[in-house]
Image (cartoon, helix red, strand yellow):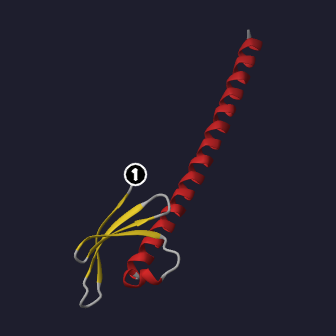
């Protein structure tokens, strides 16, 4: 009877170790995925910010990291080409050259 109890305890401990290993592996994958997603988001935000700061001179650039569309007079829609896509509405005061961000959003497909 004691032998059956010892064997069942050992099997239970072995099962617990297997589950803990799987849980740890999933946690490592989760953290790496979050880190990569944050890096991509920061890169997309930097691209949009670069386009926003150089809105007046973007036609001179050979490679543009954003899609730029005029919505109305002085209001522009800037969308990053990198994933995750970020859209920003900016207002450009043509007299003073000041650019003001109106809003932003992440584009989901």
| Residue at position x 25%, y 84% in the image | 93
| Residue at position x 52%, y 75% in the image | 63
Task: Assign the N terminus to one quadrant of the image.
Answer: top right
Query: Taking 46 as reference, is 9 above or below it?
Result: above
Which residue occupies the foreground of this view, 26 or 93?
Answer: 93
| Residue at position x 68%, y 27% in the image | 15
What x and y, as percent, mark residue 50? 45, 77
What x and y, as percent, mark residue 71? 26, 68
Residue 107, by quadrant, is bottom left
Which residue occupies the foreground of this view, 22 or 98?
Answer: 98
| Residue at position x 62%, y 48% in the image | 28
What x and y, as percent, mark residue 83? 49, 58
What x and y, as percent, mark residue 91? 26, 76
Instruction: Answer left or right for 93 relative to 9.
Output: left
Which residue does the numbered mark 1 point to in the structure image? 108
Query: Taking 98 as reference, is 47 above or below it?
Result: above
Instruction: Residue lying at the far top in this picture: please name it.
Output: 1
Which residue occupies the foreground of this view, 40 or 62?
Answer: 62
Query: Taking 94 as reference, is 17 above or below it?
Result: above
């Amino acid at each position: 009877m004691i032998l059956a109890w010892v064997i069942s305890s050992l099997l239970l401990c072995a099962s617990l170790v297997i589950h803990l290993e799987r849980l740890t592996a999933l946690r490592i994958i989760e953290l790496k995925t979050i880190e990569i997603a944050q890096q991509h988001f920061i890169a997309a935000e930097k691209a949009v910010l670069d386009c926003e700061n150089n809105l007046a001179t973007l036609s001179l650039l050979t490679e543009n990291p954003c899609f730029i569309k005029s919505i109305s007079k002085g209001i522009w829609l800037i969308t990053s080409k990198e994933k995750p896509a970020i859209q920003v509405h900016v207002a450009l005061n043509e007299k003073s050259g000041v650019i003001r961000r109106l809003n932003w959003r992440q584009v989901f497909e």
